[in-house]
Image (cartoon, rainbow, N blue to C red):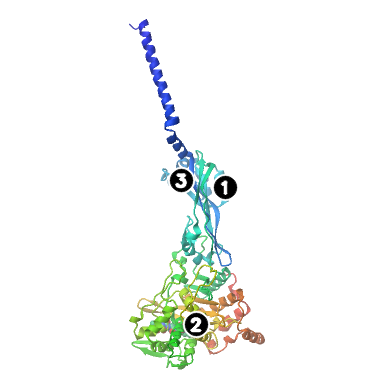
């Protein structure tokens, strides 16, 4: 029965043929399916494994100063990245890779394992071209480079607060990098590439879209003035052991910010272990009570009422004046003095008597017109507007204390902008952080005669008998106002913590520059604005007028000096000098050079 019989042969043959035929059919079907029916799907799958669309980063625009000097530039760098799966398989190579990239090999393992589902992880961003080359020379599977840009800040700490900085993704985080991010950042492009099994680009297939580079920004800042202001402020903060400080310099004709520096500062090129406090652009974010630097506006309001003229006499009595249950005090007893002398000596009682002789609205109006309590127009991120309350709630005590600068708050930038009104014949201009093609239309907010009279009074502050002699600059007429302010604290005013201020302009015959110097908590014994802030103003102003080639408008004082040969200007004489020791030395320092020797090497 096991033997094949002849008649069973054809049946077996048929079965075998049938099976073979079926298999052949199946193969043909499968071939058809792969080649034609499912082709698109398979092609896509294959492409998905090898054909990639990758982003090509856009070049971020440059931030330059008003003369085209770079303040923030992007340079090409590479980022090292990996395909976790592939790199996980090359464990033996980790130590080399980790050592080169200065990362922990164990941490690298964890980093990869936790991201094994992904196809892309950064190992180290923004490495130097040199290091990138060394990494690729290792030939570790799954490791590739990605082209990008790194931001570099040539002026470092000097312009750090104004320029700000970007994060690793090249997006503006602070300062003007943030304010002008949209303008600077451009649009990344993309291209299609073919990658091999190890994820390396083997062929550029096509550009899908070109990256659109960002646009450049020219700031209003003049890098030379910025350096000058920074050096002098830093030296002053160090020698007075102050907590912090700011200097703001504006162009009177345009409202452009020519210099804005703060202490403490930071190096934007290396922001490891930094405190958030250092990032603050105090010139626009910090408010303080302006104290006596407000008095020129109180006087302007008094002149506007028509009840006062520069020569009107005011009895400041014994320097004590009771308003309600508050006593207004002067540091010295000035007796009967004219309005001009109220400014020159900084009499709180004098300012109070003028304020009480006018309607509350008149005082409020001038503060409001010169921009207190309102944003500067410079669009700086995080800018504070300060506080100016409505006059409806002002009683006699409020009117008195407001007249000499307490009960409102301002930023250094706002104070500088307000002084700009006095410097340019009563015209109010918005402040700008970018270079302007032409000056903006000013708004006349004060009669030119009033502005001119107040300017003249402020010139006496810097001359014999004034509180701010060391703000003077040989060869130029300078005007300004000192301020020494007890800092407010919970429940009143701190007995031993002060702000030293000086705000002013030069040259008086045709003001070109306005500047505010603010020094917070000088702790070396001296704390008067006239002794701590005014000399900083004088040194920076002297250098700035020279750098900008501003013609001297007080040649007579230079001649006198040359003839006397003692290097002491006309301002360094008079009663106030005895009251403020150290004054002549300071003046001498900037008579001979705008950059005194002891400043060298500060930066
Ligand atoms: C002063 C104040 C505090 C707040 C007084 C400064 C007041 C006041 C309550 C005594 C130091 C000081 C609202 S002084 O800035 O008058 O810079 O050249 O802090 O008066 O009522 O030992 N400035 N400063 N006053 N408070 N409240 C003068 C003046 C000013 C000078 C000096 C001497 C004050 C010449 C301040 C300067 O003009």
- Near-viewer residue (469 or 61): 61
Q: Secondary structure at mark 3?
A: loop
Q: Is residue 103 visible?
A: no
Quadrant placement of the C terminus: bottom right
Q: Is residue 132 visible?
A: yes
Image quarter where ligand 1 lies: bottom left
Q: Secondary structure at mark 1?
A: helix
* Picture residue at 47% right of the left edge, 40% below the top: 86
**Where does residue 159 sit, x and y in percent of width and height?**
53, 66
Tell me which label, 3 or 1, sits earlier in the chain.
3
Mark 3–mark 1 CB contact (< 8 Å): no
Q: Which numbered circle lies on residue 481?
A: 2
Q: Is residue 152 left or right of 397 when viewed as pictured?
A: right
Q: Secondary structure at mark 2?
A: strand
Mark 2 CB near ligand 1 (8 Å cut): yes
Tell me which label, 1 or 2, sits earlier in the chain.
1
Q: Is residue 386 left or right of 195 when viewed as pictured?
A: left
Q: CA distance from mark 3 to mark 1?
A: 20 Å
- Residue beneath disc 1: 133
Tell me which label, 2 or 3, sits earlier in the chain.
3
- Residue beneath disc 3: 120
């Amino acid at each position: 029965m096991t033997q094949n019989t002849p008649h069973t042969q054809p049946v077996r043959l048929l079965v075998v043929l049938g099976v073979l035929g079926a298999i052949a059919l199946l193969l043909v079907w499968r071939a058809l399916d792969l080649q034609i029916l499912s082709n698109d799907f398979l092609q896509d799958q294959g492409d998905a494994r090898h054909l990639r669309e990758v982003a090509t980063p856009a070049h971020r625009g440059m931030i330059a100063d008003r003369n085209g000097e770079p303040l923030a530039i992007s340079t090409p760098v590479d980022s090292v990245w990996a395909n976790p799966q592939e790199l996980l398989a090359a464990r033996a190579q980790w130590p080399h890779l980790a050592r080169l990239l200065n990362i922990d090999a164990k941490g690298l393992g964890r980093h990869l394992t936790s991201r094994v589902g992904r196809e892309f992880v950064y190992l180290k961003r923004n490495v130097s071209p040199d290091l990138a080359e060394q990494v690729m020379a290792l030939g570790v599977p799954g490791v590739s480079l990605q082209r990008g840009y790194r931001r570099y800040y040539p002026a470092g700490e000097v312009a750090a607060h104004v320029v700000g900085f970007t994060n690793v993704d090249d997006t503006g985080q602070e300062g003007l990098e943030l304010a002008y991010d949209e303008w600077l950042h451009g649009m990344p492009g993309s291209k299609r590439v073919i990658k091999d099994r190890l994820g390396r680009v083997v062929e550029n297939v096509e550009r899908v879209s070109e990256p659109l580079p960002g646009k450049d920004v020219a700031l209003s800042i003049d890098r030379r003035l910025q350096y000058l202001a920074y050096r002098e402020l830093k030296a002053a903060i160090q020698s007075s052991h102050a907590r912090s400080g700011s200097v703001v310099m504006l162009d009177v004709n345009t409202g452009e910010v020519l210099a804005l520096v703060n202490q403490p500062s930071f190096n934007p090129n290396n922001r490891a272990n930094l405190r958030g406090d250092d990032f603050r652009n105090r010139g626009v974010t910090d408010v303080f009570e302006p104290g006596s630097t407000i008095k020129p506006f109180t006087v302007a309001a008094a002149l506007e009422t028509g009840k006062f003229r520069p020569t009107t006499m005011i009895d400041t009595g014994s320097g004590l004046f009771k308003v309600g249950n508050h006593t207004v005090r002067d540091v010295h007893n000035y007796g009967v003095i004219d309005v001009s002398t109220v400014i020159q000596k900084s009499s709180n009682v004098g300012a109070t008597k003028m304020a009480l002789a006018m309607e509350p609205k008149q005082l409020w109006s001038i503060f409001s017109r010169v921009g207190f309590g309102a944003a500067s127009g410079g669009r700086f991120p995080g800018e504070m507007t300060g506080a100016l309350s409505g006059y409806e709630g002002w009683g006699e005590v409020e009117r008195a204390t407001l007249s000499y600068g307490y009960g409102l708050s301002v930023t250094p930038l706002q104070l500088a902008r307000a002084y700009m009104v006095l410097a340019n014949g009563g015209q109010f201009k918005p402040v700008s952080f970018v270079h302007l093609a032409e000056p903006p239309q000013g708004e006349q907010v004060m009669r030119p005669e009033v502005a001119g009279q107040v300017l003249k009074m402020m010139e006496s502050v810097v001359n014999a008998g004034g509180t701010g002699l060391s703000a003077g600059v040989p060869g130029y007429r300078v005007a300004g106002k000192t301020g020494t302010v007890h800092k407010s604290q919970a429940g009143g005013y701190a007995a031993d913590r002060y702000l030293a201020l000086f705000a002013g302009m030069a040259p008086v015959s045709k003001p070109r520059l306005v500047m505010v110097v603010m020094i917070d908590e000088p702790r070396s014994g001296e704390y008067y604005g006239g002794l701590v802030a005014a000399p900083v103003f004088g040194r920076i102003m002297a250098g700035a007028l020279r750098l900008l080639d501003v013609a001297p408008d007080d040649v007579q004082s230079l001649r006198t000096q040359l003839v006397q040969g003692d290097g002491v200007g006309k301002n360094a004489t008079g009663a106030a000098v005895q009251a403020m020791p150290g004054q002549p030395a300071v003046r001498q320092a900037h008579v001979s050079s705008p950059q005194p020797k002891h400043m060298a090497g500060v930066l």
